[in-house]
Each structure stands twice: as C-alpha cells, then as structure tokens.
Amino acid sequence: MQLLGEVPGSGYRRPPALARRGDGQVISLTPLLHQVLLAVDDRRTVAEVAEQVSTATGRGVRPEDVRQLVDASLRPLGLLRRADGTEPEVRRSNPLLALKLRRVVTDPAVTRRITAPFAVLFSPLIVVPVVVAFVAVSAWVLFSQGLAAATAQAFGNPALFLAVVVLTVLSAGFHEFGHAAAARYGGSTPGAMGFGFYLFWPAFYTDVTDSYTLGRAGRVRTDLGGLYFNALVVLASFGVWWLTGWHAVLLLVATQILQMIRQLLPLLRFDGYHVLADLTGVPDLYQRIGPILKGLVPGHWHQPEATALKTWARVVVIAWVLIVVPLMALSLLLVVLSLPRLLGTAWAALGKQADLLGAAFDDGDVLGALARVLAMVAVVVPFLGLAYVVVRLVKGAVTGVARRTEGRPGRRALAAVLAAALVAGLAWAWWPTDDRYRPVRAWEGGTVLDAVPASSSSALTEGSLGSATTVWPADAGPLPTADRPVLAMVLVPADQQVAEGTEGTTGGDGAAPTWVFPFDRPPAPGEGDNQALAVNTEDGSVLYDVTFALVWVDEDDDALNRNEAYALASCRDCQTVAVAFQVVLLVGSVDVVVPQNLSAAVNYACVECVTYALATQLVVSLPGELGADGQRALAEIWADLQEFGEGIEGIPLAELRDRLTEFEKRILDVVQQESTDAGPPGEADDPATGATTDDGTITDGDPAGPTGSDSGGTTDDGDGSSGSTGTATTTGAATSTPAPSTSPAPTSAPASTTEAGTPSATSTAEATPTG
C-alpha cells in the first residue's frame, strides 16, 4: 500500500487523501482515515495510534474508535492486514465504464526508460510552434485541400486502407506515450503501459496515478499529453504527404482530429473527463452525480454530501451533471428507437462484405480479404459493446431495485409495474412490423429527429424523405404509398449560371462538390462561350451536364467563342457525362475568327467509372441576317434540340455524336436554303480557307473565312461544306487513372464555301476515359 497524500488544488472543502493498494486500485480517503493510516505501524499500540490521530486532527479519538475505523473501513478496503497478518479479501470495483481485461506491455521501469526522451517535447519552446503548425495544417486539410481524394484513394485500394487503419491504431499507442512523457516532464513517475477493452473496443492505457502528486497545471498537462502527441502525428502525416504526394496519408490527419475530439468529450472516461476532474480538483465526478442531484432537490441544498465541494467546484460539477445526465439519457433513448434500423443496416452490410470477401478469396487478393474481414469486425464490435452495456445496466438495475425494495412490498410492486411498462415500450419499439428493420438508405436524413417518425420533417427536399401536394391524374391508377412507390420526375431550377445565349440541364443540386483533382478548376465561361462542366464525387451516381448555345457574331465583333465540355470523376461505380454543343453564326464580314472547341474527360482515383465528354462546335458564315422563315425553322430545330437534351440520359453514349451531327445538318440546310433564296453572295463564292495553330490564332488564309478547332482531321460531308471531327479516347485501369486525360490540342480545320456561298466549319472534340 502506498499513501499518495492529499490532492493538490482539491475542489473539496476538506481535501481527501489518496492511497494506492498493491493491485493498483486507488482509494480516496477522508482526512481521519488518512491520519489513522499514517499512525499505524508495527510498533504503536491501538492506544498510541488513537493518541497520535487525536494530536494530528485536533479531535478526541478513542482506542475503540480506531478499532472501529480499522475493522469497518480500512481492512475491507484492503489497506490493512488482518490481526493474524493475512491479507483481507477485497472486491475490486468494477464500474461499467472501466477498462477491462488489462494486459501489461511495459512495466514501470521500461515505461520510464522509453518515454524519457519524449519529455523534452513538452518544453514551451517546442509546444508553441507545434500547436501553431497543427492548427494551420488541420485548417488547410479540412477547409482547403479536402479529404475526398484521400478517401477515394484509400478505400479504392485495400492496401492503403489497411495501412491507414494500422497507422491509426499505432497512433493510439503513441497517444499513451504522450501521457507518460508529460508525467515525466512534470516530475512524476509513470507506471505500466498496456492495453485492454473499453466497452468491447480495444484501447491502450498508461498508469499515471502518480501525477496526483503534481499541482493542477501538472495534472492537466499529463491529461493533454496524449492529444499533444496526436498533433505530432498530424504534422508527421503532413510531412509524408509533402514528400510523397500520397493523398491517402491525409486521412491520418482526419483520424487524429476525430480521435482528439472524442477524447476531449467529458462524457465517458476519456481525456476530457480527466481534464475536467483535474481542473475542478474532483477526481470522482461520476460518484458525485447522486449527491449533486439530491442536493438540487428543494430542502437538500445544505446537506453535508451536497456541500462537500467548494462553491466554484460545485457550480462546475452541477453544470457537468446537468449536461451529461440528459445527454446520456437521450443517447440511450435514441439507441433504443433506432436499434431496429441499425441492426438491419448491419445485417445488410455484413452480407455485402461477405460477398466481397468471397470475391477477394476467389481472386487471391489477400489484402482485399483482410480489408473485408476488418470491415466486418468493425460492424459487429459496436453491437457486442451495446449488448454488454445493456446486460450490465439491466443487471445493475435489477440488483439495485431488489436491494432497495427488500421488505417493502408496496415499492417492489411499483417497481414491477414500471418494469412491465418498460418491457412493453421496448416491445413496441422493436417489434418486427412493416419495414422497421429495413437498412438505412443513403438518401435518408439520418438526423436526430428522424429516429422518431412523428417528429421527422415532412418537407420534400432533394435527397430526403418527405411529402408534398401534387396533382394525381384520374386515370393514373391508385395513389402511390410508402410500400408501393411510383417513380416521379420533379423539375428543379438549375443553380448553375451559364453564359448569355446558352441553355443547359445539369444533375445534382447545383452546389459545386469538393474539388479533389490535382489541377485548377476550369475558368467560368465568358461572354459568348459555352461550357458543360460535370464534376462527380458521389459513389454510385449518374451525373449529366448538357449545354446548348446559339451565338450570333456581327461583322463589327470578333469570333473568339469557346465551346468546352469537361467530365471530371473521382468516385466508384459512377457515370459522368458532359456535352457542349455550340452554333456560331457569323453575319457579314467578320475579320477575326478564332473559335476553340475543347473537351476533357478525367478519371482521378476513380474505380469502375465511365467518364465521357463531347464538345461539338459549328461555325457558319452568313451573308446577312436570316429571314423570317429561316428564323422560324431555326427556332424549331432549337426546340427539338432542347427536347433532345431533356432526354439525353436515356440515349447510349455511342449515339450522342451522331445525333448531334443530325442537328448540325438540319441547321446547315436552313442556312443553305436561306442563302440560296438570297441570291449569289459574290465574292463569297471563292473558297475561304484558314488554319488554326495550337494557340488558336489564324496563321494563313482569308481572315474572314470560317475556321474550326478539333482533335482530329477533316472530312467532306459531300454537300460543299467542310467539317472536322476527331476523337481522343483514353482507357484507365480497373482501379484508377493516375493522371488527367484530355483531348489533343486543336489542329487546323479548313473551310470551303457551299454551293450557296455559305462557308462553314464543324469541330467535334470527344474524350472518354473509362475505369
């Protein structure tokens, strides 16, 4: 037995003393018991001990009082031997939230030796820059860089996923080094280090009981030492990313921050609990819940148990109790209500992981199999912990109620009625009716209120379950229900801003997803430009962005129009399509004609994905404005084009280009007919040719002639117009495409004059990486 003395900075009015038994259990003692232990030795008699205690405490203590304290308190606590010299049988406390099945990895001597070099890290000259750097790196990762690329890369590669998991577990052990090193820096002696199970979750621990001999600042430093070492892991992870460029390493930053947040919560016996306990000087916060709640009852405010704490410490502990008790009760209620859905989700997840595990075994993928086994363990362990907690709570409640109602049949009958009501409530919440055990779906809200159906919101928003008033046709059959839903289309205004003269349809909610690609976002389209930008980072989704633009260029203006289609994907089992179609009509003699037609399809950390970008640009020279008939015909074509865009998701990707070519021919027919009706254009009968360099400038030929830019050669459409088409196709492996793939730089596209004197050029850029 070791006497640790009074706790410095205690929140008690009469500071308790601490004693540590041989089995490591720390006991809190009243001042009187502490003085008795100090006076007891192998030489003093009971009378001498009583005299010594009376002198130390200033109270009259008789020998029979000493015998009573020894027999009723000290020996049952295991702090004194029996009169015959044998050790008393003691029952070690077994609180619900204690670490179980402890196994020592390093004894105190080894712990002191391996943690001594780390104590220097707690020098203020090192702590301040480390904390500043940690804040800067965390802010950059969370608010600038983002974790989408890291998540996709890690979860798409079993080896990286396992590496992240292993390093996260090792960092938890390094966290305990921080506690021990902080204790060494403060002057106390750390004890054994090891691991155990906390509610069925494996956890590391360090015995820093000796830190109770430190002042308040030293104890808080010891409590925060583990979090400080988590910050060091964050900086080390950032350094590895800086040197290697492996995005998956940044997931360690997220895991450390989440671990730190969890540790700071003062609910369970994590670091935050110990920080609060050491700040207030009340090491047994959970044991104070009962006295605090009793003291809040009118008439009990001044009872001894309620007034044992100093005023400021009592206020802090009361606030803690009033926060923790309702939160724990609410958490228990939510777990009870949502347990059927959680069990259904876990069962579905286990089935999916089992299928993937079988596929990994069939393919001989050892790392993939280990990743699936780890995922299945992660699904099962929380429910084992939950079952353990429920069994302990029920057992403790039954035992406590039986003890308190012994010999009181009225109270026992009332307890039986309450227990029956509780069982009935659980039966109502867990009875397998309807779809109560259905898995949680991705589109469900998952908010706290969603756990209670009557309290969930009924507003119909994208991605949520709700209701809205609608018109149901009389001949459409019976009304749909939750069990028999009917697919419906809801038109939502697109939030994406498009250039003047463009119209488009886009998937998603219009909000730009997190940018995960290793290059800058394409600049927004300028005046007269057209851009389709589909950025997909959602697994299992289909995203289309389609834009159409009709641009008129007068002879006083320059034709510098850009038509761009970008399909960018970083997801799993997803489809991303961008289609940009632009028609540029040059009215009269336009001196500068430098159109650009670009497409890019990029797979980045993309697995089992189809990414397709198609940009088609038609540039036509007109001798003058179209007539009324031509305007009307062009409007009809454009209406058909819009209808085509609305149903484009149902058209195979291989047919998109041909369908757009049909619209091009229709537009050219209208222009040709108008030009024929207007008579010969004179000088326009001479073929006009032009060439476009990589930077899009005209280097040879008539500057007023039509040009086109594309990714391929030219073809003759047979009607006197000249068109250029090209295809750039890249195919990624089944895992991901490490670098972006785009269409080649524009090449020259000649233009000739139609029979009616209407020069035109068509350019098509297509890019399709698949993975």
Image: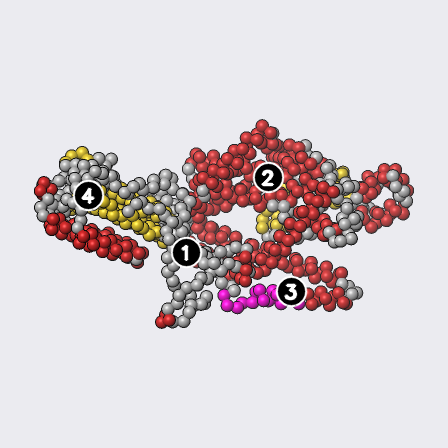
Nearer the observer, 526 or 253: 526
User: Mark 1 or mark 2, which is nearer the start of the sequence?
Assistant: 2
Looking at the rendered structure, the kind of residue marked 3 is: Leu
What residue does disc 2 label?
226
Residue 359, label in figure:
1
Q: Residue at x 30, y 45 (%)?
A: 500
Residue 514, label in figure:
none
**Residue lying at the far front of the rendered structure:** 628
Foreground disc of the pair 4, 1: 4
User: Mark 4 or mark 3, which is nearer the start of the sequence?
Assistant: 3
Q: In this view of the protein, can residue 567 be seen by the observer?
A: yes
Where does the image place residue 44, in percent across and percent down from the top left? 87, 39
Foreground disc of the pair 1, 3: 3
- Calculate the distance from the C-alpha at mark 1 to the C-alpha at mark 3: 45 Å
Q: Which residues are magenta?
A: 420-435
Name the quadrant containing residue 697.
Answer: top left
Name the quadrant containing residue 404.
Answer: bottom right
- Calculate the distance from the C-alpha at mark 2 to the C-alpha at mark 1: 40 Å
- Calculate the distance from the C-alpha at mark 2 to the C-alpha at mark 3: 41 Å
Foreground disc of the pair 3, 4: 4
Q: Residue at x 31, y 50 (%)?
A: 504
Q: Residues within 10 Å of mark 2 (few under 14, many from 20)?
A: many
- Calculate the distance from the C-alpha at mark 3 to the C-alpha at mark 4: 80 Å
**Residue lying at the far top of the rendered structure:** 125
